[in-house]
Amino acid sequence: MTQSPLNSNTPTGNAAELQRLGGLHRMSRTAGLGSSDYSAVNTASVVTLLIGGASGLALLSPIFLVLPVVGVVVGIIALRQVLSSGGTQSGATLAIIGLLFALGFSGFTGVKAVRAAQTVANDENELKALVSNFGKALSENRVADAYEMTDPRFREQVPMERFKKFFDDLTGNEFVGPVKSIESNGLFAIETDPETDFRMAMGLSLMKTAKTSDDRPMRPEVRYRRSGDQWRIIALPEWFPPSQNPGAPGEQRPG
């Protein structure tokens, strides 16, 4: 008796088609595996790298310190996005490099700013001490010692005899009298001369004398120059006008 095709071990047309499709499905899990590994570069990571590089502008001006701050914020966001993407995004390395740039430039700028502020603070303390010592020497009638606290360029224009005569006349003035003290008011304008690279400063002092009210001291202007490792007085424009002291800051020497 002939065996029915339905009872045969040979698969029917539909069954054979299903087996073929099943084989293709199994193959698709391994075939072309590299193409399924593609992950998009995180946009925030690229932005972090760009901002990190631009953070170098902070070295030119503190106003650009906003760049590294923004770079750090965007960098943290980028890393969070990449790490939480489940491998669908890349760019963590770009974000880290951008963060390092931003942190490096901001740190260097910060250290530079701190050092500059410390230099100014040291200068202000030295200037206060200079004014105080200058006044103390005059109050003790040590005019020669006070004269030695001036800059050599001042002494070129104002001889010792003229310097001493001025304070002798000041002491003998019926409305002024002997100097009791001279102190700085604590406010200085300090800058570096771009031509000579000398540190220059100016400020008001508070001078008390025997015949003036302590509540209303005289306020002579004092100008300074840093000579070597110390500050010296380079001009007393109210007592020795600039025409007599062309070496003062802001004044041009005659040709």
Image (cartoon, helix red, strand yellow):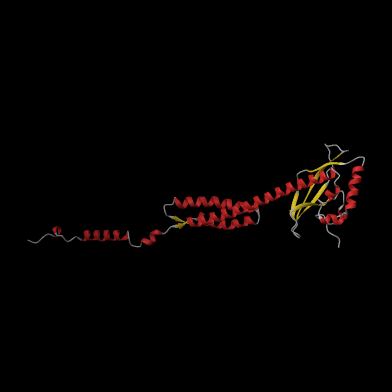
Expressed as whole percent of the image width and height from the top left, the position of residue 29 reads 32, 59
Expressed as whole percent of the image width and height from the top left, the position of residue 212 reads 87, 38
Give 156 or 136, whichever is nearer the viewer: 136
- The number of numbered discs placed on residues in the rendered structure image is 0
Quarter of the image with the N terminus is: bottom left
Give 69 or 220, whichever is nearer the viewer: 220
Expressed as whole percent of the image width and height from the top left, the position of residue 32 reads 35, 62
In this picture, residue 172 sits left or right of residue 235: right
Question: What residue appears at the point 90 percent right and 51 percent down from the top-left corner?
Answer: 162
Question: What residue appears at the point 79 percent right and 52 percent down from the top-left corner?
Answer: 232
Expressed as whole percent of the image width and height from the top left, the position of residue 119 reads 69, 51
Question: What residue appears at the point 90 percent right and 44 percent down from the top-left corner?
Answer: 170
* In this view, 63 is above or below 35: above
Give 6 or 169, whichever is nearer the viewer: 169
Quarter of the image with the C terminus is: bottom right
In this picture, residue 10 sits left or right of residue 62: left
Q: Quadrant of residue 48?
A: bottom right
User: Residue lying farthest left?
Assistant: 1
